[in-house]
Structure formats: C-alpha cells, structure tokens
Image (spheres, coloured by chain):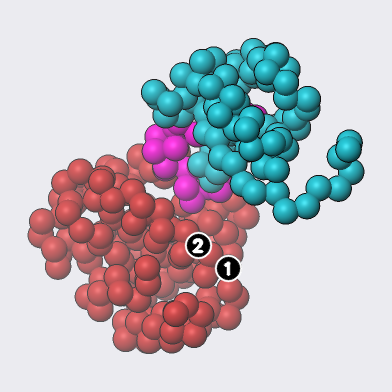
Chain colours: A red, B cyan
C-alpha cells in the first residue's frame, strides 16, 4: 500500500488559504468534492467533524490526518495541503500543524483505512520526510517526494 | 513436546479452565495478563480512535495461558476448553494454538 498511488495532483494544494482547523478541513474537502462530484460534501464534513470529536487527528510533529469512513463512497479519496500559516489543530503535543492530509474511505474498506493511516502516521515520524514536504512548492513536488521516499523505503 | 498457547478473551472462564486443567493432569501453566492489539491501537494511539467501533470486540483484558506439555495432551486440553467455553462454536471467546518445542531447560525430569 503506497501513499503515492493515492495522490491526485488536483487534490493537493500549496498553500492552503484558511487558517482555522475546520476551515482547513473544508478547504481540502473542497478539492475532492470539486473533482469528484459523487462525494457528498455535506455528509463528508459531518463525518469528519464527528471523527474530530472523538479525539484529535493531529498526530503530533506538526501533522494532522483528518479522516472519515463513509457509506456513500466506493473508493478512497485523498487530499493534502500545506497551510500558509501553521494551524492550531488541538494536537496532543500542542504543536501547530503545517502538514494536513485528508482521507475519505468507503465504510467497507476498513483495512484500507487502517493501512493508510498506519503508513502515513509511521512515515511522518521521519523528520527528513516532513522537512521535504514542508519545502514543497507545488503538487508535483509532493508526488515526487512521496514516490522517492516510498521507492527508497518500501519494495 | 509442545507448547500450547491459549488466548482467552472471556476471562470469566479462567478459574474453571485452570481447575479443569488440573483435573486432566496438566501439572502447571503460566497465565499472563494480555491486551488485544485492536484495543491498544484504538485507545492509545489517537489517530486510530475513530476505529473503536471496528475493534469493539478487542478486549482490554485477556489472559494468555502457556502450557508446555506432551503431544497427547493437546486434544484433552482442546476438549476441556471446548466444554467450558464453547470456543469452537463462537468466535471472540478463545483461541488455541500449539507449536513444537525444540528444547526444554529448567523443567523437572
């Protein structure tokens, strides 16, 4: 399972314009909803907010992965953005967030969701990768960074 | 010689199980407190908190029972476990595996 295979140029945005947690989530969701009209934005935002209420998706080290599992979608949708300014995501380590990944998974594909969350949260412990990502200027840079990283670390 | 490993999710059966093991001649066992991975993942790692419903069957308190025994005891232990817990009929109660033991040290001759 490779993150790079889920990256869609049109769903990567640098910089994100919003500065508040829920606005940033919505801005990323807009990228998905604009390209994929089958994604119900209202349902998505509600599910994402419900998930945030359980516990923050800011995993520490300036990274957040808001995510949701939904009955109405049939495939995985993935978006990523770098906010113009760091965003308070109510992270457990209190650090503001400057890398935000948004993940929508079909209700039935729990294992895919677990795999993607596990892969993302694990590789983003790597300070060098985070540094490379924060330096990305455009969508293609992000795809290149992930592709290079996964080629190097995963067969 | 075999090592039997029983993962007991329904710990309310533990006392009856150990008594029954003594009855059938199991001279000793090691009982460990254990926790299912799903429980730890969904409760201790915040990014997986949304999966608590998915891991709902993962108990916070399991017991893992280790028994080093002769091969002919495997079926007896399985019978006892089956009689007491009904684990063959329903998942989530217990699991049992046996693995070969190459060497024994520190055991009574």
| Residue occupying the point 47% across, 59% down | A118
Asked if residue A47 is positioned above or below residue B90 in the image, the reply reads below
In which quadrant of the rendered view does residue A35 lie? bottom left
Residue B53 among magenta residues: yes
**What element does badge 2 sit on?**
helix
User: Marks 2 and 1: CB-CB under 8 Å?
Assistant: yes
Q: Which residues are magenta?
A: B42-64
Q: Point out residue B1 in the picture as x, y percentages from the top left corner.
A: 70, 43
Asked if residue B42 is positioned above or below residue A106 in the image, the reply reads above
Q: Residues within 10 Å of mark 1 (few under 14, many from 20)?
A: some
Q: Quadrant of the C terminus of chain B?
A: top right
Q: Which mark is residue A94?
A: none
In the picture provided, is A28 more to the left or to the right than B64?
Answer: left
Query: Residue tagged by mark 1?
Result: A125
Q: Which mark is residue A121?
A: 2
Distance (Cα) linking label 2 and label 1: 7 Å
Closest to the observer, A3 or A141: A3
Can residue B93 be seen from the camera position used here?
yes
**What element does badge 1 sit on?**
loop
Residue A112 among magenta residues: no
| Residue occupying the point 43% across, 26% down | B88
| Residue occupying the point 41% across, 58% down | A115
Subunit that carries the residue with mark 1 = A
Asked if residue B13 is positioned above or below residue A79 in the image, the reply reads above
């Amino acid at each position: 399972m490779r993150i790079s295979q889920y990256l869609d140029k049109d769903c990567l945005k640098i910089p994100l314009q919003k500065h508040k947690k829920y606005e940033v989530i919505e801005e990323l969701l807009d990228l998905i909803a604009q390209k994929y009209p089958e994604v119900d934005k209202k349902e998505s935002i509600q599910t994402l907010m419900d998930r945030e209420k359980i516990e923050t998706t800011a995993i520490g080290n300036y990274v957040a992965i808001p995510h949701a599992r939904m009955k109405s979608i049939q495939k995985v949708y993935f978006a990523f953005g770098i906010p113009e300014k760091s965003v308070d995501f109510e992270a457990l380590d209190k650090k503001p967030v400057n890398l935000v990944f948004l993940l929508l998974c079909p209700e039935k594909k729990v294992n895919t969701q677990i795999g993607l969350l596990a892969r993302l949260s694990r590789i983003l412990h790597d300070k060098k990768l985070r540094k490379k990502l924060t330096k990305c200027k455009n969508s293609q840079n992000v795809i290149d960074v992930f592709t290079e990283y996964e080629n190097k670390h995963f067969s | 010689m075999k090592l039997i490993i029983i993962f007991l999710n329904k710990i309310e059966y533990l006392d009856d199980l150990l008594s029954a093991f003594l009855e059938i001649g199991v001279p000793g066992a090691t009982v460990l407190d254990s926790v299912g991975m799903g429980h730890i993942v969904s409760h201790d790692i915040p990014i997986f908190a949304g999966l608590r419903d998915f891991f709902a069957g993962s108990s916070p308190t399991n017991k893992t029972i280790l028994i080093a025994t002769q091969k002919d005891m495997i079926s007896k232990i399985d019978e006892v476990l089956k009689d007491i817990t009904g684990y063959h009929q329903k998942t989530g109660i217990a699991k049992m595996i046996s693995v070969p033991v190459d060497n024994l040290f520190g055991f009574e001759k």
